[in-house]
Image (tube, rainbow, N blue to C red):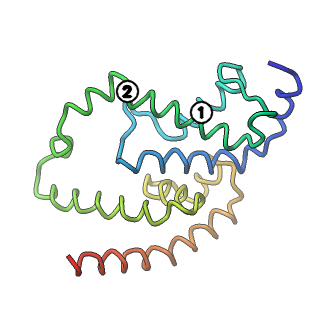
Amino acid sequence: MDESIHNLLKGAKWEELIPKLTAYAVYLCTIPPYSLPGGKQYEDIVMDAIEKVFKGERQWDPLKNLDLSCYLKSVIKSLLSNEKRSKAAAIMKMIPEDLQVQHDDNTIEELYCREVDKYIISCLEGDAALLLVYKAIKDGQSPKQISEEYGLDIRNVRNIQKRLSRKLPEVLSQLQNVKNHD
């Protein structure tokens, strides 16, 4: 890899890029809904993309692709596409989705929660920070854990969390209106 490219990569604002790229990976997996096989997380895909660029396995040409973020998004999209065609993904496709949920008294509630979750994600997709914090909170992470994992200032995480707490009632109200019109 050219030293100038390596220096550009080292100088990138990773603390801003990684959360945005992770939110982009989450977004790509919402339409159509897709779960990563093998216990992978969205962050794993993002870090794989960054690693491939650093190692030169995916060659970024700053003259052709001025915006590193846009280039990394294309790498992430490619990696996710490869994941979707993997053997593990093929096996998951063979199992009907309703069989992937444990069948007990809460199955209908679980399916409803999934639909609500999909709707919330679709409403938040325009705001990468909200989407990322929503996913992390849903995964049970505290603001401190989110701050540490994504390299965000804790105050920023708490502000995003406040924005999210104001946004969710709007989204749920919209969902209720949609359900009432059906």
Q: Quick one: label 2, few (<14), some, or many (20+) residues within 10 Å?
A: few
On the image, numbered disc 1 is attached to which residue? 75
Could you tell me residue 179's position as x and y percent?
Answer: 24, 75
| Rendering coords of residue 155 (x, y %) | 69, 66
Residue 39, quarter of the rendered image: top left
Looking at the picture, which amino acid does disc 1 mark?
A: Val
Among the 4 quarters of the image, the one containing residue 84:
top left
Q: Position of residue 34 (x, y in %)?
A: 36, 42
Position of 128 with respect to 109 (left or right) is right
Residue at 81% over, 33% down: 63
Q: Is residue 74 above or below residue 174?
A: above
> SS class of the residue under badge 1?
helix
Q: Up-down: is 171 above or below 69? A: below
Image point 35% across, 47% down: which residue?
Answer: 33
| Front position in the image: 2 or 15 | 2
Kind of element beneath mark 2? loop
* Dot label at residue 85: 2
Q: Earlier in the sequence, mark 1 or mark 2?
A: 1
Q: From the viewer's perspective, is residue 35 above or below residue 168?
A: above
Please say if 15 is above or below 82: below
Closer to the camera in the image, 6 or 61: 61
- Please tell me how crowded label 1 is: few (under 14), some (14-19), or many (20+) other residues with Cα within 10 Å: many
* Quadrant for the N terminus in the image: top right
Q: Amino acid at mark 2?
A: Arg
Determine the residue positioned at 63% across, 62% down: 157
Q: Quadrant of the C terminus?
A: bottom left
**CA–CA distance in space, label 1 to label 2:** 15 Å
Q: Residue furthest front?
A: 64
